[in-house]
Image (cartoon, grey):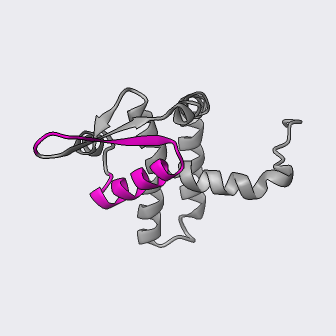
Amino acid sequence: MATETCTLGDTEQLVRLVLDQIADKWSILIIAALCRGPMRFNSLRRDVHGITQKSLTQALRRLERSGIIARRVIPVSPVAVEYSVTPLGTTLIEPFQALFHWASVHKEGIEAAQARFDREAGALVSDDEAIALRAVG
């Protein structure tokens, strides 16, 4: 058992605000894509598989508002918009890499736990709920 603890102290409200901005699945994937270099909207949409235009637009606005990404209008015909990670946004690369590494290292353990949960909860979960649980995994 680990002896380390995760304590927020008096920063809980700030941590919640920050996590609301950057910790949803789309924001993390968008930032990861933009860390490879500036991208236009449609390139981002193709790169971040499964994201809708609406979700991408909302996430980009939220990240721009927080100073994590920058939006640049390119004066061509038709007008193009390019997004890039700001210096503040680049400070997220290291923690995101740690998260990606953790997920890679623990993938099999997570999948085994999910399979065990699904087996044990099978009698308690409807077919639709079981399908939804598997889809999330």
Q: Quadrant of residue 52?
A: bottom left
Q: Residue at x 43, y 49 (%)?
A: 26
Q: Which one is in front, 115 or 51?
A: 51
Q: Does residue 54 sit above or below 82 in this rendering?
A: below
Question: Would you identify the image quadrant in which residue 103 lies?
Answer: top right
Which quadrant does the N terminus fall into? Answer: top right
Note whether 96 is above or below 130 in the view shown: above
Task: Report the residue at 52% width, 70% height from top.
Answer: 125
Determine the residue positioned at 53% across, 31% down: 87
* Residue 1 drawn above or below residue 101: below
Residue 9 place in picture, x, y as percent: 86, 51
In the image, residue 9 above or below residue 39: below
Lateral position of residue 134 relative to residue 114, left or right: left
Magenta-drawn stretch contains 97: no
Magenta-highlighted residues? 51-77
Q: Nearer the viewer, residue 111 or 73?
A: 73
Residue ranking furthest to the right: 3
Q: Is residue 68 left or right of residue 11?
A: left
Q: Is residue 65 magenta?
A: yes
Question: Residue at the spot x=53%, y=36% of the render?
Answer: 89
Image coordinates of residue 119 in percent, x first then y, are 55, 56
